[in-house]
């Protein structure tokens, strides 16, 4: 893809995996609602070796957590390559630039640019929001910093500019539906090199989305990663269907999860059966998305269920992962 | 227009608890048409306050008066006696009118009776919706007449976020997604290609972010009559 | 408390309820003297301020008839 910085600077492992042509796998590591670094190290242990990189969420759903950059640095030290998530909700352009200079200095190489959930979803509903820039402007800002060595105000920065491997997100199921592929194209033009999607449960709609991206001719310029989130049970499926804006969970998915626990009286056993089904379904989905032209990887969001990543990735035949090059220890 | 809502009676009573003579001052402009602080609301609030006072210590007299506009000296002056005669003025104007009272009459004591909410439009009887954010750098030309600064919960400039669903905003099913409306309208007008190019980061310095706003129109400036230099010809009417 | 006789202000429409009150008088039907009738051209004329004013002036209850 893009020219990367000098050989002396460790590069993004995720970028290398894509460059090698391998089908990439990323996971998710949610920082704790506290200051204990052990939480990150424990989660990293569950993910190490099974994913190429992990998203470190930035106050996800507007609930306060350990900072994304700090948690990413801990994950990096623990040998799991992080993808720093940066939303536009909590910081203005000044703060974002400053924090990302710091992130690069700490050895973090991947950056995922998002708008961010509105703070009314979270636990600081009375707070002020920012949205000085939007996610697309954020991608462009960091692309300009990377390729031209300038800040958003046009001033040059000192020394070697941060050369983040830039990512973006898209929700193929959000309205206006037909506009979504155009938004992806816009993110590509802004400088995004990889793109993770919202959790997919409606495969037909996702295929439509991908074929439109193909028609627009943007698939050569961006690595699309299909977002998948294993279901823990019918309750989670229903919650996603009914409560999460922009999610599309067909009824048959809910029925499938319900069916998996049918006739099992014991609560623990039933939960086990549901989870086994969730993992099985996720593996099937990986196999299905691999067949879709332009899908270059999967982003497995096992929310507070990191243990599920290994069996999913293993079951999908995606192990072992390509060797991490220039990983944590060297930083 | 400026859209406001009346503060709860308890809060207003609390703010005049030390006072004997209270004036409820209504405003005949924006807050009249949004039924928050006009003549009628001033009358009702004054009556409510008198009864509340009667039910407790009974020591408070409350009068009411409504002027055409609290945000202009000339109109405010018509209420000068009433304002000066009150221990406290409960202003039923927006925050601008409320502050104008003490700017014009620095010795007056004023408390707000309204919470000023936004610049909005009555979309139907009893419903007001925000339409302008006063950002000082209007983008309506680019968005075909629908403001994303005030009507998108995130003030995005490059299209809808991932939370848009069924034409509604992720924040509430009571809110329309501004970008959904913009995309629909652009399609209708054949302007959707505008969204292909990135809208540059906005210059927020013309909004509150640049400090308190101030506009000076040199062509309209006139020295107050009393301060014109001696000997200089007046500039006429 | 059993002595309590509530003072009621009755806002009556000229065209119906007020006429009915008149007729009641003509028929020698009695209603409590604690009721004060206020004739309105139409109950549509009634305003919140009038009701508040009645209470402020000591009414225990307000009746709107039209």
Image (tube, rainbow, N blue to C red):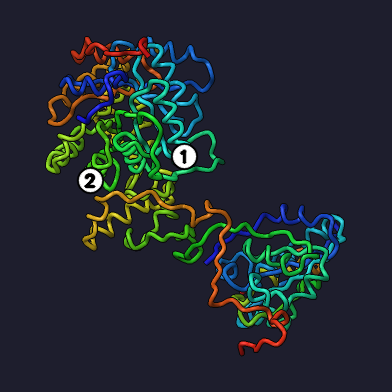
Residue closer to the observer: C34 or B227: B227
x and y percentages locating residue A177 in the rendered image: 25, 45
Marks 2 and 1, the one that precedes in the sequence: 1
In the image, farthest residue toward the front: B231
Foreground mark, 2 or 1, reads 1
Q: Is residue A133 left or right of residue B77?
A: left
Is residue A162 or residue A319 the one in the foreground?
A162
Q: Determine whether A255 is above or below A153 in the image.
A: above
The residue depicted at 36 percent of the width and 39 percent of the height is A150
B178, above or below A310, in the image: below
Q: How many marks?
A: 2
- Quadrant of the image occupied by residue C17: bottom right
Residue A34 visible: yes
Residue identifier under label 1: A94
Q: At numbered mark 2, what does the secondary structure look like: helix, strand or loop?
A: helix
Instruction: For the C terminus of chain B, give its image quadrant.
Output: bottom right
Q: Which mark is residue A182?
A: 2
Secondary structure at badge 1 equals helix
Chain to which mark 1 belongs: A
Where is residue A230? Give x, y as percent: 30, 22
């Amino acid at each position: 893809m893009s020219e990367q910085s000098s050989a002396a600077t460790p590069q993004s492992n995720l970028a290398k995996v894509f460059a090698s042509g391998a089908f990439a796998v990323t996971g998710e590591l949610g920082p704790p609602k506290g200051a204990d670094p052990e939480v990150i190290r424990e989660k990293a242990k569950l993910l190490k070796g099974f994913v190429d990189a992990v998203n470190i969420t930035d106050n996800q759903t507007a609930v306060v957590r350990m900072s994304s950059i700090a948690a990413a640095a801990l994950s990096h030290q623990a040998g799991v390559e992080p993808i720093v998530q940066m939303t536009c909700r909590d910081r203005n352009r000044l703060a974002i630039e400053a924090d990302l200079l710091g992130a690069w200095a700490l050895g973090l190489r991947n950056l995922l640019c998002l708008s961010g959930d509105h703070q009314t979803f979270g636990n600081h509903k009375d707070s002020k929001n920012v949205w000085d820039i939007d996610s697309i402007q954020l991608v462009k800002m960091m692309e300009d910093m990377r390729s031209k060595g300038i800040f958003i105000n046009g001033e040059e920065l000192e020394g070697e500019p941060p050369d983040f491997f830039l990512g973006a997100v898209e929700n193929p199921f959000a309205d206006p539906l037909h506009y979504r592929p155009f938004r992806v194209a816009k993110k590509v033009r802004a400088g995004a090199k990889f793109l993770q999607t919202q959790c997919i449960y409606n495969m037909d709609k996702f295929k439509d989305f991908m074929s439109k991206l193909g028609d627009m001719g943007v698939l050569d310029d961006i690595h699309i990663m299909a977002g998948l989130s294993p279901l823990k049970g019918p309750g989670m499926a229903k919650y996603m269907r009914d409560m999460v804006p922009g999610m599309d969970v067909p009824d048959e998915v809910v029925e499938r999860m319900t069916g998996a626990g049918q006739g099992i009286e014991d609560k623990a056993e039933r939960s086990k059966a549901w989870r086994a089904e969730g993992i099985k379904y996720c593996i099937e989905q990986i196999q299905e998305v691999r067949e879709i032209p332009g899908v270059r990887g999967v982003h497995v969001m096992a929310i507070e269920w990191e243990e599920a990543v290994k069996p999913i990735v293993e079951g999908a035949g995606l192990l072992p992962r390509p060797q991490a090059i220039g990983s944590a220890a060297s930083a | 227009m400026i859209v406001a809502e009346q503060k709860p009676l308890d809060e207003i009573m609390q703010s005049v608890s030390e006072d004997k003579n209270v004036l409820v001052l209504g405003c005949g402009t924006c807050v009249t048409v949004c039924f928050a602080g006009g003549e009628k609301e001033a009358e009702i609030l004054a009556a409510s306050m008198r009864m509340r006072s009667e039910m407790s210590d009974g020591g408070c007299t409350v009068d009411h008066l409504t002027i055409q506009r609290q945000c202009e000296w000339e109109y405010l002056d018509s209420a000068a006696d009433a304002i000066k005669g009150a221990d406290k003025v409960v202003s039923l104007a927006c925050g601008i009118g409320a502050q104008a009272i003490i700017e014009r009459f620095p010795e007056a004591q004023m408390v707000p009776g309204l919470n000023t909410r936004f610049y909005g439009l009555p979309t139907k009887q009893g419903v007001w919706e925000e339409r302008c954010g006063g950002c000082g750098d209007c983008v309506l030309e680019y968005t075909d007449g629908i403001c994303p600064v005030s009507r998108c919960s995130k003030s995005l400039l490059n299209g809808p976020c991932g939370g848009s669903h069924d034409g509604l905003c992720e924040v509430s099913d009571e809110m329309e997604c501004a970008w959904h409306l913009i995309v629909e309208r652009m399609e209708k007008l054949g302007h959707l290609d505008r969204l292909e190019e990135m809208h540059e980061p906005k210059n927020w310095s013309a909004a509150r972010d640049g400090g308190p706003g101030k506009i000076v129109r040199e062509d309209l400036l006139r020295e107050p009559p009393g301060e014109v230099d001696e000997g200089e010809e007046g500039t006429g009417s | 408390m059993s002595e309590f006789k509530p003072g009621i202000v009755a806002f009556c429409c000229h065209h119906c309820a007020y006429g009915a009150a008149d007729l009641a008088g003509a028929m020698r039907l009695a209603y409590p003297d604690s009721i004060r009738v206020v004739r309105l051209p139409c109950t549509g004329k009634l305003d919140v301020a009038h009701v508040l004013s009645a209470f402020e002036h000591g009414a225990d209850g307000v009746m709107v008839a039209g």
